Amino acid sequence: MENHNTQFPDRFSLISATDADYQAWRMIKLEQASDLLANSDPVLIGDLSAITPAEHDELSRRCEISNAVFYHDTQETSDPDTVGNLLRQFAQNIGLRIAEKHRSAGKDGIVSLQVSDSVSQKGYIPYSKKPMNWHTDGYYNAPDDKIRAMVLHCVRAADTGGVNQVFDPEIAYIRLRDENPAYITALMHPFAMTIPENREPNGNVRPASIGPVFEVNPQTGHLEMRYTARTRSIEWRDDATTRAAVDFLQSVLNSDDPYIQTIKMQDGDGLLCNNSLHNRTGFDANSDNASTRLLMRVRFHNRVNWREKRRT
């Protein structure tokens, strides 16, 4: 087992770990996450295109502990094209490989999340004022096209609503395993969750996506999660333990668990995470005018690595 640094809990295979190993990891994980969330002001970034070594290290440190970090662009850049260029440089400097092949991806794989009536976006919740339920990004992707990290950057906040919640997949794992270890076994089954085939208006077909909820990356030893709380266009393995595990996980996500982070991102705020669970409340529902809320999203094949040196 590799000893990365005494500051962080050792990573190990959560499948084969003994209960003693798990309990040791669990204790350190919860202690460090609690300490971090108790002092969770956003990391201030002076220039997204050229983060300093101190900014890089703090972003990476927080991601290593809790898989998510909020930051604030002190320049509060408001031009979307400029923000897109800044985010591309930000990703490069922190060592992330842009993965977006989304139908709505613009330059450099950056997606603008805003209310839209365009043919390719109409009817999809991310481009509406509606609330979004708990999910990880890319839960419908093929196994060889996983999303492992993500940036959400707020260019223009909603007038009302648009609140995000974020939950660490490793804490979700802990809650499930503490309740019933059989829940973990069920959600690691290779056929635990199926997202059926989807045929888009332009005729493109997204094949069915079948796989586990939890999986350990064999190269890194890190836990990865694939999940959606949607109730339509999803098929869970027809097994009593799987159904019980899904129900329990949903109860945790709907609770006031102290490790759930809640924030309404303002102009210049951003979230960098290892594809953590997240949701969004509805926004600007009573406004007579079209909402101007704009978030920009970049998704990545690799996760934030605190040992990755800042690139220049």
Image (spheres, rainbow, N blue to C red):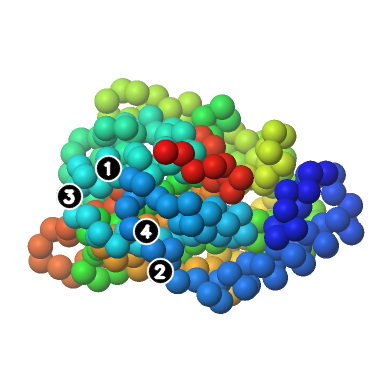
Q: Residue at the spot x=40%, y=50% of the render? A: 51
Q: Position of residue 23 (x, y in %)?
A: 83, 62
How far apart are the alpha carbons under marks 3 and 1? 9 Å
Residue type at numbered disc 2: Ile
Q: Position of residue 186 (x, y in %)?
A: 74, 47
In depth, the one of 55 and 188 nearer the eye is 55
Query: Around disc 2, counting alpha carbons within 10 Å, would you say few (fewer than 14), some (14 to 19), or many (20 or more)?
Result: few
**Which of marks 4 and 1 precedes in the sequence?**
4
Residue type at numbered disc 4: Ile
The residue tagged 2 is 263
Query: Around disc 1, counting alpha carbons within 10 Å, would you say few (fewer than 14), some (14 to 19), or many (20 or more)?
Result: many
How far apart are the alpha carbons under marks 4 and 2? 18 Å
Secondary structure type for disc 4: strand
Q: Nearer the viewer, mark 4 or mark 2?
A: 4
Residue type at numbered disc 1: Gly
Query: Around disc 4, counting alpha carbons within 10 Å, would you say few (fewer than 14), some (14 to 19), or many (20 or more)?
Result: many
Q: Residue at the spot x=83%, y=44% of the render? A: 1
Q: Nearer the viewer, mark 3 or mark 2?
A: 3
In depth, the one of 26 and 89 nearer the eye is 89
Residue 257 appears in the figure: no
Q: Position of residue 193 (x, y in %)?
A: 60, 41
**Which of marks 1 and 2 precedes in the sequence?**
1
In depth, the one of 258 and 153 nearer the eye is 153
How far apart are the alpha carbons under marks 2 and 1? 22 Å
The residue tagged 1 is 84
**Which of marks 4 and 3 precedes in the sequence?**
4
Q: Quadrant of the C terminus?
A: top left
Quadrant of the image occupied by residue 84: top left
The image's mark for residue 45 is: 4
